[in-house]
Image (cartoon, rainbow, N blue to C red):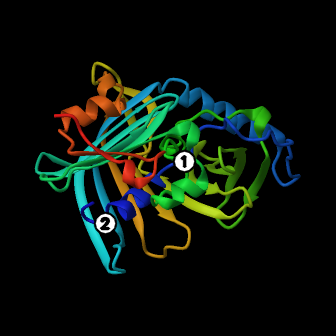
Amino acid sequence: MGLAANRILGLILITAVLLAGGCKSASKVRTTEVNDVLIDALIEHHNERVQHIDRVWARVSVRIKGTDSQGKGFEEQGEGHLQVTQPDSVSLSIGKLGETYFAYGSNAERYWMFDLSNSDHRVSLVGAIANLTAERAGEIGLSVHPGDLISSLGIEPIDADGLVEARWELGVEQVVLSVPSRWGVNEYWFDPSTGLVMRVISLGASGEEIAVSELSRYKPLLGEQRLETSIKVPGKVEVSRAGLSGEYVRIELSEPSQRAIKPMVYNPDRLARAYRVHEMIDLDQPAENSSPANP
């Protein structure tokens, strides 16, 4: 796999923290530091905004700073497309000069990554969401669940009844609301003056920090007719992974809209044919069971 693909995949897919399914329900605990009226108002305002966001299509500029498999630092920059359809489908492609080098995403059943950087040996890696564990994800460079990009964009609704904790973060004057995630807890950091999410922190089952997503430059979401709406989405998302100082993925969205999205971008089988993949790797099988793609 080219350009330290596993490392890049791990860095980018930590741009993730999504569904609350599969977790034990937690008791609602509200600290006395945050007024319940404010908590309810923030959740209501947030859910009112995101309920109108059933999909997002955007051109993106992506900058990646990390460390390759030899321990050497690198910086990469590319362009591509981000496509999201609620509640669980994500697609992100990255390339240069109109050529796609990486494509990855997830749907309700599967997650995938395509390394297309070597035109003579294009590879797809596909696994079943149902079989994905934190340990297995770690083996291929993933920090958290691959569908979690939706939460990191701050466009997923919050279940008030599932609230684990609420607190003031006095240093930045933000309200932090914690809700269950698949593998732990997600913290949403709200600016109480705007009601917008400024940060999403993914915590593991033991409370350890996994990844931090910083949201900024909110901009209007364009409607199907490319007309500006009153709905705002972050124009810049910068994600860093715990324990990797100075490494990040920065995604800048250009003219995010609710235009129609082709179903094939969420179908790894169709993508494999479209990209003319040479080798298909089933992440749920031993490595030696990988197979060449059908011509």
**Left or right relative to 159: residue 237:** left
Element assignment for label 1: loop
Element assignment for label 2: loop
In the image, 24 versus 45, the foreground residue is 24
Q: Which residue is mark 1?
A: 145
Query: In the orientation shown, which residue stands out farthest toward the front?
Result: 288
Q: Quadrant of the N terminus?
A: bottom left
In the image, 202 versus 107, the foreground residue is 107
Question: Upstream in the sequence, badge 1 or badge 2?
Answer: 2
Q: Which residue is mark 2?
A: 4
**Left or right relative to 40: residue 251:** left
How many marks overall? Answer: 2
Q: Residue 86: x and y, percent? A: 49, 28
Quadrant of the rendered image containing residue 263: top left
Query: In this rendering, is residue 30 above or below 240?
Result: above
Name which residue lies at 30% across and 26% down: 264
